[in-house]
Image: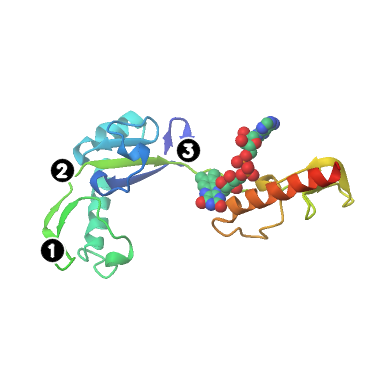
Amino acid sequence: MEVNGTKGVFLEFYNKEQMMPAPMQLAEGDYEGRYYRRTIGELPELFEQLGVTADPETVIETIRAYDMAVMGQGEYPDVGKAIASRTVGNVELNEDGTYNVESYDLDNALLTIRLMAPSTHHTMGGIVVDTDRHVLDESGKAIPGLYAAGEVTGGIHGGNRLGGNAIVEIFVSGRTAAKAVSADNK
Ligand SMILES: Cc1cc2nc3c(=O)[nH]c(=O)nc-3n(C[C@H](O)[C@H](O)[C@H](O)COP(=O)(O)OP(=O)(O)OC[C@H]3O[C@@H](n4cnc5c(N)ncnc54)[C@H](O)[C@@H]3O)c2cc1C
């Protein structure tokens, strides 16, 4: 599939009423290239507008089957809530927290369709530095006056950075580098 010249785009479907509030998600209209508000009946037109070649009817039936699984119904009733806590379509909750399957309605649900594309999340390798953040040359010697901090450097996270650690690293390594600059220029 190709959208706006980008290959490998994913479409995510949410029920607009059930989305976590975020600035773009609160906006009422489309957010061009990112978010679109549509009902199920408007999907074929949106797919055409975006150049999405997937068959809208197949997509709609897939969403319905997914919702049934979330509600413990359909072809995969045992999957149930293990896959998600919310349906894409509208459905009322019973007092005991189960879904009132009789009330399920996909046709009138206002959906948010989000375009996603693969991108680089974090670069693991990078410039080699010492513990004071001096940049090292190929022989392991510090290059005078050159310091590096943050994602541009490599090594600190090993082979798989743990979530959240990049932000910690930029503050810690930035401060360390600044202290080294100060100490080196006394
Ligand atoms: C979608 C996404 C989600 C993420 N979520 C998390 C998270 O939840 N937790 C976490 O810890 N990390 C997360 N990360 C990783 C983290 O955000 C980055 O590792 C971190 O922001 C890198 O900070 P930095 O200052 O080292 O580099 P950057 O933020 O990349 O800063 C480099 C700066 O240098 C500028 N620049 C580039 N070239 C030049 C030039 N020639 N001259 C002047 N300036 C230049 C750039 O414009 C940029 O402003 C996420 C990353 C992405 C992409």
Q: Nearer the viewer, residue 186 or 71?
A: 186
Q: Amino acid at mark 1?
A: Asn
- Disc 1 vs disc 2: which is toward the camera? 1
State the residue at coordinates (31%, 31%).
Answer: 30
Q: CA distance from mark 1 to mark 2?
A: 20 Å
Pointer 2 residue: 108
Residue 7: assigned label? 3
Relative placement, left or right, of 185 versus 31 is: right
Q: Are marks 2 and 3 in contact (CB under 8 Å)?
A: no
Residue 38's quadrant in the figure? Answer: top left
Q: Secondary structure at mark 3?
A: strand
The quadrant of the picture showing ligand 1 is top right
- Disc 2 vs disc 3: which is toward the camera? 2
Q: Secondary structure at mark 2?
A: loop
Q: Nearer the viewer, residue 74 or 162?
A: 162
Q: Is residue 89 above or below residue 50?
A: below
Q: CA distance from mark 3 to mark 1?
A: 42 Å
- Disc 3 vs disc 1: which is toward the camera? 1
Q: Is residue 72 above or below residue 38?
A: below
State the residue at coordinates (25%, 35%).
Answer: 44
Q: Amino acid at mark 3?
A: Lys
Q: Earlier in the sequence, mark 3 or mark 1?
A: 3
| Residue 70, horizontal then vertical, whole percent | 25, 61
Q: Are marks 1 and 2 in contact (CB under 8 Å)?
A: no
